[in-house]
């Protein structure tokens, strides 16, 4: 993991401190420790592959006491809205708004995944991403 991180940093000319495991592959006993050893500081892996929601039952970031990693839960992913459900556009909008409202009402912190490949016409999910950003902006979210 450290070699991969260093290769990407060299190519980008920028330090990387935040990550998310592909497919949300995760092990409480290994993931955060391996990431910390690679020099990472923040992880956004804690979420569900197949449905939106709060895997640790809260939209609260935390510090893993063993690795020192800051853990930011992932609560929504593009495929939750398009692949794993057969939702109308209206229902997708309601799902996005519901999660965003819960984050605001609880003062929570979370991450959202929108894969770069889904902006291509093969998927055509880019409009959903833009609507999500518009909702976040109107609701007063800080984005990073």
Image: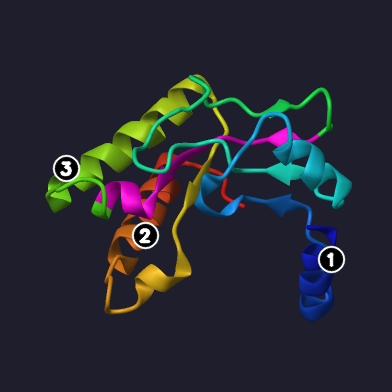
**Residue 91 image label:** 3
The answer to if 130 sits in the magenta stretch is: no
Magenta residues, as a range? 69-81
Camera-near label (1 vs 2) is 1
**Residue 129 image label:** 2
Q: Is residue 126 left or right of residue 94?
A: right
If you read the primary sequence from the N terminus, does the residue marked by circle 2 or circle 3 appear first? Answer: 3
Mark 3 and mark 2 in contact (Cβ < 8 Å)? no
Up the image or down, 49 lies above or below 13; here it is above
> Which of 45/72 is in front?
45
What's the CA distance linking mark 1 and mark 3? 43 Å
Residue occupying the point 33% across, 53% down: 79
Task: Look at the numbered disc 2 and give the secondary structure of its residue.
Answer: helix
Figure label count: 3
Quarter of the rendering occupied by the N terminus: bottom right
Q: In this view, does 104 lie to the left or right of 10?
A: left
Classed neighbour count for the residue bearing mark 3: other residues with Cα under 10 Å, few (<14), some (14–19), many (≥20): few
């Amino acid at each position: 993991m450290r070699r991969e991180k260093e290769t990407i940093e060299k190519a980008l000319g920028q330090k990387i401190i935040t990550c998310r495991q592909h497919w949300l592959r995760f092990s409480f006993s290994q993931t955060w420790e391996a990431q910390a050893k690679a020099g990472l500081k923040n992880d956004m892996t804690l979420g569900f592959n197949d449905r939106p929601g709060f895997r640790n039952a809260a939209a609260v970031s935390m510090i893993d006491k063993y690795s020192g990693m800051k853990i930011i839960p992932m609560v929504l992913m593009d495929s939750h809205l398009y692949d794993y459900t057969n939702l109308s556009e209206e229902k997708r909008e309601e799902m996005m708004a519901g999660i965003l409202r819960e984050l605001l009402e609880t003062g929570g912190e979370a991450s959202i995944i929108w894969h770069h490949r889904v902006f291509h016409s093969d998927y055509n999910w880019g409009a959903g991403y833009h609507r999500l950003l518009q909702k976040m902006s109107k609701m007063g979210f800080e984005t990073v």
